Each structure stands twice: as structure tokens, then as C-alpha cells.
Amino acid sequence: MSETAAVEERVEDQTDAYAEGSLDDPAGVEAAVPAEPDLSPETPRPGTPAADVLKGRIKVADEVVEKVAALAALEIPGVADLGGDLERAFESVRDRIGVGSKRATQGVQASIQDRQVSVDVTIVIVYGHVVMDVATEVKVNVARSVSRMLGMRVVEVNVNVDDVRLPGQDAPGEDAPAA
């Protein structure tokens, strides 16, 4: 075996041993199981103050809530787009002239008051889906996502269905390539 091959084999053995966690055992006989760190609330890390003792504020901007709500609304099957007619027309013009990109919060407005959130969502439904079912799913998913991701109490989600996307109707900015 050449010297290079021997070195490569030792490096592979060490890499395998490291991946298995057996480097602690010089003989390599027994693989060491990495101990899970105890991060329970009863035993805080040394030098780290508990969350209830630590002072400071956390402020979440309305735009963060709006982005989370917009993504949650778009997850629902049957939602074609967000925003009212005027917002979608403005985005279409902006896309055609190549200025900027689509706002992630288009069609969503949020208001935060004392860790309580109210959200207004304007959606476009895909033709063939039951409007009330899609709107209800949007309402539930927006409330669940905002509550889970931001830790805020959602007190109100208003869903406005502004339009229906017809079959064969392309979304703005999805023009067919010129032949």
C-alpha cells in the first residue's frame, strides 16, 4: 500500500470515528454516546439569567405579521393571489416595467395592540373552489401561523374575497413567452 493510500485510510478511519463519537475512547472499542445537554428550565446555564428576570423588550413590526399571514394564506389550495384590484394592477405595471419586485405583504394588513393581533387579508380565489371553504381555511391558517410563529394572540382575521381567477387566465407577470 502506498504512503498516500495509508494516510487517506487513517484520515477516513478518524473521520468515521469522529462521526461515531468514539474518539473519546483511545482504543476505539466502545463508541461514546454524546450526552444530551440538560437545558431544562430548572437548571439554567451558568451565567445566563432566567427569561423572567432578564429585562428588555421584544417588538414585532406589523410588516412581520403581514408577511407571515400572506404566506399562510397562499398555502391554502384555491388561493390564486393576494390583494385587491388596484393593488394587483399596480403590481402588474411595476412588474412589466421592471421596477422592484412584488411586495410580500400585498393584500394583507395587520394591527398589533398589546400582543393581540388583528389581520385583514384580501384574496383571489381559483375558479372551481368553494369560496366559503377556502376563505374559512385561510382564516384558520392565518390565525394558527401567526399565533404559532410570533407567539401573539390573534383576536380577529377578516378575509375579503376580491376576485375569482378564471381557468386559462394567467396571473399578472406570467405572460407566455413570445414566439
Image (spheres, rainbow, N blue to C red):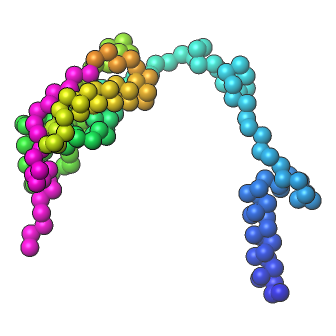
In the rendered structure, which segment of residues is drawn in magenta?
157-179
- Answer with left or right where residue 11 lies relative to residue 107: right
Residue furthest toward the right? 27
Instruction: List x then y, in percent, for residue 52.
Output: 58, 14
Quadrant in which the N terminus appears: bottom right
Which of the 4 image quadrants contains residue 116?
Answer: top left
* Residue appearing at x 60%, y 14% in the figure: 53
Name of the residue lying farthest toward the bottom: 2
Percent x, y of residue 107: 18, 33
Q: Quadrant of residue 19?
A: bottom right
Name the foreground residue: 141 vs 36. 141
Q: Is residue 110 left or right of residue 9?
A: left
Location of residue 61 with respect to 171 vertically, above or below: above
Residue 125 location, x and y as percent? 17, 38
Q: How many marks?
A: 0
Percent across and percent down for residue 61 are 33, 26
Is residue 164 at all visible to an observer of this figure? yes
Identify the residue shown where x is 29% and y is 30%.
137
* Left or right relative to 155: residue 160: left
Q: Does residue 137 appear to the left or right of 127 in the view shown? A: right
